[in-house]
Image (cartoon, helix red, strand yellow):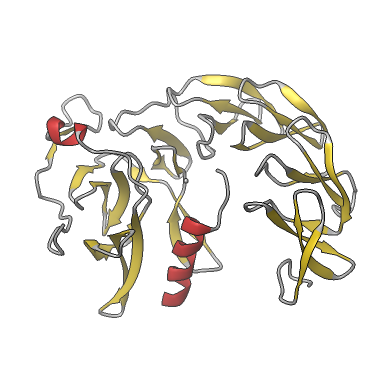
Amino acid sequence: MYATHFILITLLITVLPCCTESSDHRATITDQVTIVDSTGQDSIQTNSAKTETLAYTDSIYPYGASINSTFKYGYKNHLGKLITEPIFDLAGPFCNGFAPVVQGDVHGIIDTTGELIYIFQKYKHALWYDELAGVYEFSGVSECMYKIQINDTSFGYINQKHQLVTQKYYSELGEFSDGRASYYDNKSQLYGYINKQGDEVIKAQYERGRLFCENRASVTVDGKIGFIDTSGVLVIPAIYTATGFFSQGLCHVTQSENNDQYYYIDINGQISIPGFYEDADAFRGDTAVVFKRGICRVINKSGKEIRKLNWDYFGGC
């Protein structure tokens, strides 16, 4: 189980495309934190000069360790130097010098020294349960925005100034990417998109709305899938039965009712790699893995086979 935790963290940091000083510096729920709730909203008083000096950092990562037979998370930098001891039940990624954490019943945000500078009073971080790994993970921590949960059916977003940006609560909210996050409108039972200010910039009109990658998001219209840009224009017609997401300017799609016969298109919807493949994956760098005639193969952007794989990639190779 502990190995599974570690592998999940590594995969999140190194694999997913698209669309992310002393060992005694540890966070506690009392260090330099003042909660102000006179307006009924979550707020905090902290050292503004200190906050302004925080720079964007991709070089601090969560790591996991077994502490007294309990799995906990801490942070190290890219050189392996300890930033915080493993004291958190959940530890999210840093963005602009801040990261979300959960410590017991405390949900909050830490800075790059490991100080817990903000504690939620009315909200909690939105979480989802990974049944395969048997652990909880953050849901909707993306582009320096934090999805928060009000109750079992209500979600919103706060920004790094700890301001609630969504003008109302939603029963479903996607992650931010390319400055957009999908939302579900209960009245119309359709999906649209909000921006980081909480404005509904693309009205609810899709049977399904997915994550933006490279200025393209797949949406379902009349049972078929197409792609919109961040302004909501349907730039690639809804003619597909299944799609992946754009990476390196390419996306695998199929028009087969059996969800096979995949090929790759570019951001304008033009066929780039004809295929056909029984299954396919997104490009990671200059290569992608496809499944053809019972064999997993690595191809380049021109569709040329680089090598065959002799291990299970799609669950059938």
User: In which quadrant of the rendered view does residue 266 lie?
Assistant: top right
Query: In the picture provided, is 138 more to the left or to the right than 68?
Result: right
Question: Is residue 139 in sight in this rendering?
Answer: yes
Quadrant placement of the N terminus: bottom left
Query: In the picture provided, is 6 more to the left or to the right than 315?
Result: left
Query: In the picture provided, is 147 more to the left or to the right than 43?
Result: right
Q: Is residue 225 above or below residue 22?
A: above
Q: Which residue is drawn at 13% across and 61% down?
A: 22
Tally of numbered tags: 0
Residue 111 or residue 121, whichever sits in front: 111
Query: In the picture provided, is 296 more to the left or to the right than 181?
Result: right
Q: Is residue 52 above or below residue 103?
A: above
Residue 315: percent from the left, percent from the top?
74, 70
Outermost bottom residue = 69
Residue 228: percent from the left, percent from the top?
69, 28
Q: Residue at x 23, y 38 (%)?
A: 54
Question: Is residue 239 in sight in this rendering?
Answer: no
Residue 295 or residue 89, whichever sits in front: 295
User: In which quadrant of the rendered view does residue 314 lie?
Assistant: bottom right
Q: Which residue is drawn at 56% across and 68% down?
A: 132
User: In which quadrant of the rendered view does residue 65 lie?
Assistant: bottom left
Residue 223 or residue 153, whichever sits in front: 223
Q: Is residue 275 above or below residue 55?
A: below
Residue 212: percent from the left, percent from the top?
60, 36
Quadrant placement of the C terminus: bottom right
Q: In this view, does 270 lie above or below 112?
A: above
Q: Which residue is drawn at 27% across and 46% down?
A: 108
